[in-house]
Amino acid sequence: MLVTPALLWTLLFFVAPFVAMALLSLNFQAEGGMTVSNYSQFFTNPSYYRAMINSLQVTGLVTVISVLLAYPFAWILAEQIPPRLQRLALLLAILPFWTSYVVRSYSWLLVLAQNGVVNDALLRTGLVTEPLQLANTRAATIIGFVHFFVMLLTLTIFASLKQLNPSYRKAAADLGAGPIRTFLYVILPLTLPGVVVGAFLTFVLAIGDYITPQILGGNNELLMPQLIMMQIGRRGDFPLASALALILMAVVTVAYIACARWLKIERT
Amino acid sequence: MRGFMRLFSVSYALAVYGFIFLPVVVLVVFSLQSTAFPIPPFTGPSSRWYEAVLNDPRLIAALLNSLAVATVSSITAVALGFLSAWGFARFALPGSAFLRALITLPLTVSYLIIGMGLLVIFNMAGLPKNLFAAGIGHVVINLPLCFAIIYSQMGDHQINIERAARDLGATEWKVLLLVTLPMMWPAIFASLFLSMTFSWDEFVISFLLTRFDTTLPVEIWNLLRSGLNPKTNAVGSLVFAVSVVFAIILELILLRRRPA
C-alpha cells in the first residue's frame, strides 16, 4: 500500500512515456502499420549517424581528459594538504557547482568569445595577431564539459582516496616499495573502481546533455541531444525524435552493462 | 625529489583552481560592467545591470515560479520516496527487488529524454504545457534519488524502536508520524535539499513542458538569445551568491549537528 503512490508515479510518468515513444518511433499511428523507417533513416542518413559519432567522440574525450585532470588534483587535495584544511580546499574546488548550469556554460562563452578574456590576453601578450575562433567549436564544448566534470570527479576520486586504509601504504613501504611503486601498484589499483564509477557517470551525464553543446558548440556540428531537440522543436517530428532518443538510450545501456561487468570482474 | 614534488603539487593545484574559477570570476567581474558588453576592457564598477535585473518583472516572476516548482515538486518527491522506502524496508513485498529497481531506473535516463517522453504523452492526452507539467517532470527525476537516499538509511535498529512503539499501543500511522519520521530526519532533510537544488537548476524539462509562465533557467536561456549581455552576468551572479549563502548556512547546520 505504501509503495503504491511511488510505483504509480513511475508507471504513469516514466514507463508510459517510454512505451508511447517506442510506439511513435515505429510509426504506430501512421497508415500501413508499423515500420522501422525512423531507425533505418538514422543508419542511412549521414547527417543523423554523424551526430552519434560526434557525441561519442566528444563524450569519450571529455571523460578521458576529466579523469586525467581530476585524479592528480584529488590526490594532491587528499595527500598533500594538511587535514584541517582539506574540507575547505574541497569546498573551494567545487564552488562553481553552485552557479546554475545554464549560466556556467554562458560564462565560458564570455571567456572564449571573439573579443573575450582569453583572446584579449593573447592579443595583448602578442602571442597571436588575430583573435582565435574559440567559441562555437567542438573545443569549446569539450572545455565546458571538462570544467563541470573535473569538479564531479575530484569529489568522487577524493572520496575513494580517503577511504583507503592507511596501513596498505605502510605495508608497501615496509616491503621496500618507493612512493612511485606504492602509487602504481597499491593506491591506483585500489582506487580504480571509484574512478570507473565516476567516469561512467561523466559519460552518461555528458552524452545526454543539451545545454553545453548548444551554448558553446553552436550549430556547426550537432551532437545527439541537439539533433533530438531539433526534431522536436523546429521540425515537430516526434516519431524520428523518439527513435533517436531510444537509440541514445541503447548506447547508454551498453555503457552501463560494460561498466557493471567490469566492476563485477574486478571484485571477484 | 621532495621539494620538486611539493612545487609540482602546488603549481598543479593552483592551475586547476584557476581553471575552475576562471569562468565564475569573469561572470561576476563583468556583471559590474557599466557599458553594454561584458567583454574587456572593464568599465565598471556599476550596479546598473543588477538594477535592470531587479526591475525586470519577467525575471522576478520566473524566480518565484522556480521557487514554487522546486518546493512543491521536492516535497512531493520526498513524500513519495519516504513512503515507498518505508514500505520496502518494513514489509516483505512480492517482487521487491524488481520494483525497487523500477523506482530507481529514471536516475540513468537523461533529462532530455524524460522531458520528451512526458511531452509526448501530454500531447496524446491533450494536456496543456505549464508549470504543473514541469513539476511532474521534476518529481520523476527526484523521486528515485529521494527513495535511494532514504531507503539506504533505514537500518535494523529502527525496527526495534518502531516495535516498541507498537507494543505501547501506537497505531501504524502514529508509528510512522511520531517515531519513524523524526528518526529519519537527516535523510529526509538531505533528500529534500538535493531535490530542491536539482529542480531549481533544471532546464531542459521546464523548457519542453512550459509555455509562457516559465522557470528561471528557461528565462535565462531566453536572455542568451540576445548574445553576450551584462544583464545575464548579473542574474547569474545573483543566483550564484544566493546558492553559496544557502550552502554555507547548510554546512554550518550540518557541522553543528555532527557529534564532535
Image: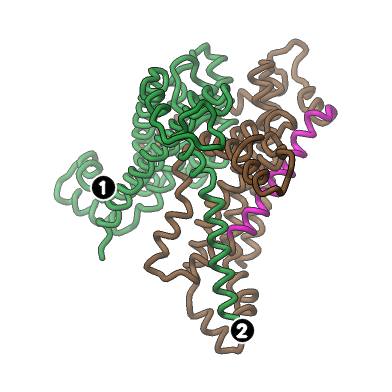
Q: Closer to the camera, B74 or B174?
A: B74
Image coordinates of residue B87 in percent, x first then y, are 36, 43
Above or below for A9 versus B26: above
Image coordinates of residue A62 in percent, x first then y, are 66, 48
Residue A61 falls within the magenta-colored stretch: yes
Q: Amino acid at mark 2?
A: Gly
Mark in front: 1 vs 2 = 2
Q: What residue did someone put label 1 on?
A: B180
Q: Label for residue B86?
A: none
For the rendered model, the colour scheme is by chain
Above or below for A221 versus B131: below
Q: What residue did someone put label 2 on?
A: A178
Point 72% across, 40% down: residue? A132
Chain in green, by letter, is: B
Point 57% across, 49% down: residue? A149
- Overall secondary structure of the magenta stretch? helix
Point 37% across, 34% down: residue? B74
Q: CB atoms at circles 1 and 2 under 8 Å apart?
A: no
* Total count of labels: 2
- Give chain A's shade: brown
Mark 1 belongs to chain: B
Q: Does the rendering let one see residue B225? A: yes
Image coordinates of residue B221 in percent, x first then y, are 53, 26
Q: Secondary structure at mark 2?
A: loop
Q: Is residue B12 left or right of residue A220?
A: left
Mark 2 belongs to chain: A
Q: Is residue B254 left or right of residue A117?
A: left
The residue segment tinted magenta is A44-70
